[in-house]
Amino acid sequence: MKLSASRYLLLAAFTLLLAACQSKPVDTAPATPVAYQQLEQSITSGELATAEDQLSALQAQAPNDARLEQYQRQLAEAYLQRSQVVLQKGDVNAAATALSRARVLMPKAPALTGGVDGGIAQARKAELDKAEAALKEAEAKPKAKVIDPTAESTVVALKINNVEQLRRQLDDIATDVVNYDCVVTLQVPRTNDYPWLSTLLTKRVNKRDPNFELELNREIHRQLPAQVVLSPRKS
């Protein structure tokens, strides 16, 4: 009877030991130099979403590795640069997305705020604030109808042989002139073309904003078709 009880206790102890071994978490494999090289390559090549995943994996594997602060900073700056580039191209949604990722990585991440020189942190924050202000300004303006807001000027060929199409063109041109504060240059092949075209455009501009100060220039180009050059003023 005593022997049976001893066997029972031994079996119970073995079962508990086996269960403990099975429930023990598996150690995470240490980060390798290749993983850091892949992260840096992803940031350099602009594969920022991939770089974020790689950074998260490395932070889980080596949370105390000081090198990760620099990589997180590089990734945040890459997102900030992307936001500025796509904003200049007029892609507001992409700029907002990239800026939000930079926001998450820069001012809120401990790796960037802890142990970083205060002057550098302030400078980075100023860059983010500036980019965010530019983004809000771009979002506030209506979508351009005929011009490229990021270009120095836009040339629009006028359809003077089709009255209906010309009227629609001038409506869109007048809208952009007011919304983007454009200087207008009418280039016409004949002197007589200027008065009636300028009158049509001026009336439309005044209808949209009676207080708008239209700057309208005239150029005669015998070899060119009638066209208008729209040049947004710099803020």
Image: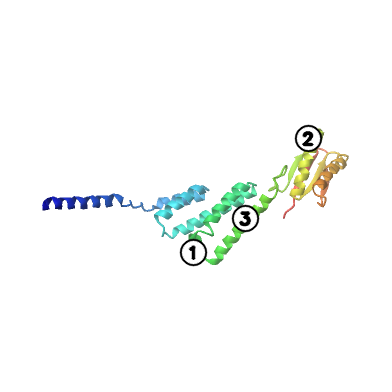
Q: Tell which residue pokes out farthest to the top in this image.
A: 162
Identify residue type, mark 3. Answer: Glu
Q: Secondary structure at mark 2?
A: helix
Q: What's the CA distance linking mark 1 and mark 3?
A: 23 Å
Q: What's the CA distance linking mark 2 and mark 3?
A: 39 Å
Residue name at image x 65 percent, y 54 percent: 134
Could you tell me if the residues under marks 1 and 3 are in contact, i.e. CB atoms within 8 Å?
A: no
Q: Quadrant of residue 220?
A: top right
Regarding residue 233, the answer to whether it shows in the image is yes
The answer to whether 48 appears left or right of 151 in the picture is left
Identify residue type, mark 2. Answer: Gln
Depth check: give the residue in front, 77 or 107: 107
Regarding residue 41, the answer to whether it shows in the image is no
Whichever of labels 2 and 1 marks the residue nearer the N terminus, that label is 1
Residue density around tag 1, few if under 14, some if 14–19, many if 20 or more, within 10 Å: few
* Tag of residue 30: none
Residue density around tag 3, few if under 14, some if 14–19, many if 20 or more, within 10 Å: many
The answer to whether 62 appears left or right of 107 in the picture is left
Q: Secondary structure at mark 3?
A: helix
Q: Name the residue tied to disc 2.
A: 165
The answer to whether 191 appears left or right of 122 in the picture is right
Whichever of labels 1 and 3 marks the residue nearer the N terminus, that label is 1
Q: Is residue 54 above or below residue 169?
A: below
* Tag of residue 132: 3
Spot occupied by residue 222 in the image (x, y as percentages of width and height): 83, 38
Placement of the C terminus among the 4 image quadrants: bottom right
Q: Name the residue tied to disc 1.
A: 114
